[in-house]
Image (tube, rainbow, N blue to C red):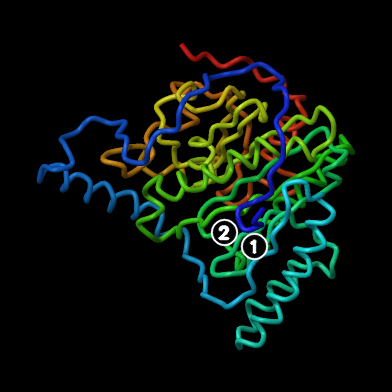
Amino acid sequence: MAAGTGTRAGTGPQTGTRTGTTGKTRGAGTALATGRGAGSGGGRLRRGLLAALVASAVVVPVSAAASPNVPAPAPATFSEDATPRSRYAANSANLAEAARTAEDADRPGRAARLRAMGAAGAARFLTFDGRGRGRAVEVFGELESADRVAVLVPGSDTTLDTYERFRAGAVSLQQRLQAEHPRSAVVAWLGYDTPGTVSTTVLSADRADAAAAELAPFLERLRGISGPGARLSLLCHSYGSVVCSRTATGSAVSDVALFGSPGTGAGSARELPTGARVWAGRGSGDWIGNVPHVRLGGIGFGTDPVDPAFGARAFAAGAVGHSDYLKPGTESLDSLAAIVLGTTTAPEADHG
């Protein structure tokens, strides 16, 4: 298979209490708020005002990351039965070649970041594509023997040029899990073109819909290369929560955790296309709480997932800021680790 879209793995039985019902992913244009038709002048005006309002809430605290169109070799390709070890080796070689190509193209910044990603040959990538903004799916821990696997889905402005901050969160989570449960692994899934924070794309679910089409089959097959009876959890940050909310998880995932979320595009947890338990948390220092939780004409993401009316199980996130949920020593990291390990004692959510 082509490595540029993520590794494929098999399905397995679902565990744990479930919230929500399996359903179909909605298109990006489904409005969850009332308003006039898109063709009316009033509707266009309201959508324009809404876009400006949401954009003004996110432009100030975050700056966009550059994603140069740097030349790179085509990604490695694999047969469907390729082992994780063979993928790690081939992608490591491809990453090294991409670094050399970037250097030759007089892009020393990208070359340095790619060499750092290679971690002196110790990194384990199920997928790597160095072209453009880039794709990468990296494993931390012994995936083939792990019975607890967390899949991290990042938000906006996560590219190969900002990958180190995404990796730092994955490493922190893996270290926290390992301290309590050695048979655990983390998969950092940069398997889609994330939107820029300061852009119109971050206001709609178009990128999320495309990402969900990649993430769903990845999750369906991931269990086949994880340890026997592995329990999978999907941890979704910021715009990544929009991706997860549109991903049909099937029976592969037992828990979905949304954090730093601008909304999902759904009115409630039971509308999400999953049978997994749905969790939501937000730190008191997270600016995303100031983003208007509205949706009109495909712009905005509607109901706040931490609102009790949404019906998700709440988890404690402490006072963290938007980029701090996976930092060592935080309450949010402890809560997310407990979700992955299945040791949390949060009460059942009421979905009415």
Q: Residue at x 57, y 48 (%)?
A: 321
Q: Residue at x 54, y 32 (%)?
A: 248
Residue 347 position within the rendered picture, expressed as x and y whole percent measured from the top left? 64, 15
Of callouts 1 and 2, the N-terminal one: 2
Q: CA distance from mark 1 to mark 2?
A: 6 Å
Which of the two residues, 225 or 49, is positioned nearer the viewer here? Answer: 225
Using residue 201 as the reference point, say whether residue 313 is left or right of it.
right
Which of the two residues, 128 or 164, is positioned nearer the viewer here? Answer: 128
Residue 175 position within the rendered picture, expressed as x and y whole percent measured from the top left? 82, 47
Instruction: Find residue 158 and name its label.
Output: 2
* Amino acid type indicated by mark 2: Thr
Q: How busy is the neighbourhood of tag 1: few (under 14 within 10 Å), some, or many (20 plus)?
A: many
For label 2, the SS is: loop
| Quarter of the view holding residue 148 | top right
Instruction: Find residue 163 and name its label.
Output: 1
Dot 1 and dot 2 residues touching (CB under 8 Å): yes
For label 1, the SS is: helix
